[in-house]
Structure formats: C-alpha cells, structure tokens
Amino acid sequence: MALVRKPASQVAISDDFLGALEKLPGQVRPRVRQIIRLFYQNPAHPSLNYEGIREAREPRLRSIRVTDDYRAIVAHPQGDGTYVLLWVDKHEAAYRWARTHYLSPDDARGLVVVPTSERDAQSPASSLGTALAPEAGLLAHCTDEQLLQAGVPAILMPTLRACATHETLMQVLGVLQANVAEAVRHLALDDNPGERPLALREPELTPAATPEPDPIEVALSRPESRRRFVMVTSQHELEQALNYPLERWRLFLHPSQQSIVQRRFDGPALVSGGSGTGKTVIGLHRALSGC
C-alpha cells in the first residue's frame, strides 16, 4: 500500500546534502535514500530518532538516524514550517559539521549555510600573507559590510583584501564554502561589467507586504535560494533530487537563468555570457518547457 504524505510541513534539500550523499560508500547510499523517502512522507515519524546537537550554534539543527554509524543533519522548523536536509555523514563527522555551521537568512542571497570553523579557513590562507596594501587588492572597491554580508569570516577579510591577482584570490576562495566563494568572486568582478556571468538583468525581488514570522522560511522563498536548496513538492521531484548528480542541473538554477528560461520573447533572442555561465543549461530548460 502506497504511503500518503502528511501535508502539514514542507521539505527542502540543500545542494550540500546531495553532494555529501554522493560521496558516501555505495552500500550506505540506498539506506540514506530509503530514510529520505520516509522523511518526506512524514518528517515526524518516530523511527527517524531525532536528536538534539549539543554546542550547535544553530538551535534548529537536529540529527536523524540513517544507520548505527551514519546520521543526517536536519534544520527543524518553527511549527508547521519547512524541514531542511543539510548534511549526511558518519556519526562524529555529521555532528562536527552541525557544530560548525549555521543558517543565515540574507535579503540578497536567500538562505545561506555559513561555516564557523574560522581557524580552518585561516590556516591555508595564512601563507599568502597580508603585505600588500588594501588599495592594491581586487576587493579594494568593496566595503567590509559587503564582504560580511557575502558570508566572509571577519578573520579572513585582511587576507582577501591583500589578493592582487586572480590566482591568489582563487587560492583563498578555495577555503570558503562554495556559495560564499562565488559571492566574493562576483564582488571582485564588479568593476568589470563585461565579465558578469549573464548579460541579462537579474529580476528584482519584491518585498512581502506582510513580514513572515520565521526569517528562515522567508529566505527559503527567495529566488536566490534556488541555487542551494530545492523545495520538494512531489514524490517525482524527490526522486529527481536523489538521482544526483545526473539531475542536479535541473534542480539548482541561478535566478538570472530561471528568469530567461521563463521569459517569453516575440522573436529570436540572444543570450550572451562567458564560458561556463550556463547558456546551454538555459537552452535545455527552454526546450524542455516547450518555449
């Protein structure tokens, strides 16, 4: 008999979770997928064995049991909100991840998972030094507030500001979380409009008329969050997500890509952008949607 899903709560899955799932041993992945299917059908199912996480900076984080050795990390909602699958790993590694990450709602970038292990970020970059004056760096035109809003740990800002070449900048960005590194990279290119990822403007976000009580829910609803989180609204979408990485490009689109995919043109249109900016993905999505 097929399970009927309880409609009270929603489920979202992060790109980081799917990446961690794909790195697990082959004998563990089927069990994870089985647990996630159960989780989607009923996030409050007692067999999930929720546990709180001591010393976690993010109070919403819980773990659910996958096997005796593996746990998945979930952000538990306030009331009947959205459950967010964030990470899966061996028991101790999963708890370590939970203690060193927190959720940050951002007006410009939606929901962001921010790492707090600043000493890990400092060590690889420390060899680059900070001998250059801030004026010489690629980020000289950025304010400290912009870098902090992008998710850069304060302790790493002097090293970033000392980066005068793209090679040294990329070396420092390698110690940051992917979405934070991408935000900083775009800040560094801000004074070179020709190097922006897409030639078309990104859609402007319209603030909600009535503020939502839960900032995490508001952040998840923002278009920018679609690059890092997929809202699962059907069993079919869940299966697509669990088929990562083959279906990943169908799940996580930048809002600027999404706007072009959904746009209606009166005639032929040209989408321009540098190598690797997603032009082919846009074409595939438009073909699938019958545009």
Image (cartoon, grey):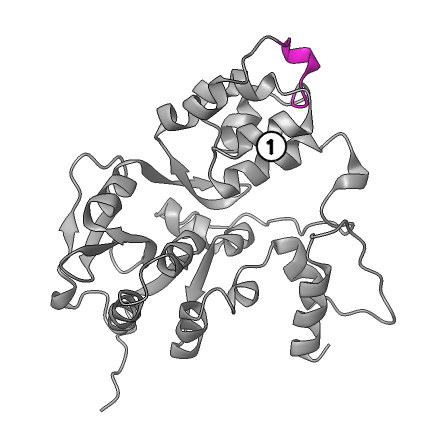
Q: Residues within 10 Å of mark 1 (few under 14, many from 20)?
A: some
Residue 134 part of the magenta segment: yes
Residue lying furthest bottom in this view?
1
Mark 1 belongs to which amino acid? Answer: Met
Report the side of 212 relative to 157 (left or right).
left
* Residue 236 position (above or below residue 49): below
What residue is drawn where x is 74% and y is 42%? 196
Q: Horizontal and vertical percent for residue 97?
A: 29, 42
- Asked if residue 14 is positioned above or below residue 287 in the image, the reply reads above
Residue linked to disc 1:
170
What is the residue that sits farthest to the front in this orientation?
A: 26
* Residue displayed at 52% across by 35% down: 174
The residue lying at 51 percent from left, 43 percent from top is 179
Image quadrant in which the C terminus is located: bottom right
How far across and down, in percent of the image, does residue 202 sit? 69, 50
Query: In the rendering, at what x and y percent does residue 73 appear?
Result: 27, 52
The answer to whether residue 182 is seen in the rendering is yes
Could one spot residue 60 in this view of the protein?
no
Comparing 210 with 234, the one in front is: 234
Q: Position of residue 120 (x, y in %)?
A: 38, 28
Under circle 1, the secondary element is helix
**Type of secondary structure dominating the magenta stretch:** loop
Which quarter of the picture shows residue 24? bottom left
How many numbered dots are placed on residues in this image? Answer: 1
Camera-side residue of 44 and 221: 44
The magenta region covers 132-139
Q: Is residue 224 above or below residue 234?
A: above
Relative placement, left or right, of 46 versus 193 is left
In the picture, the quarter occupied by the N terminus is bottom left
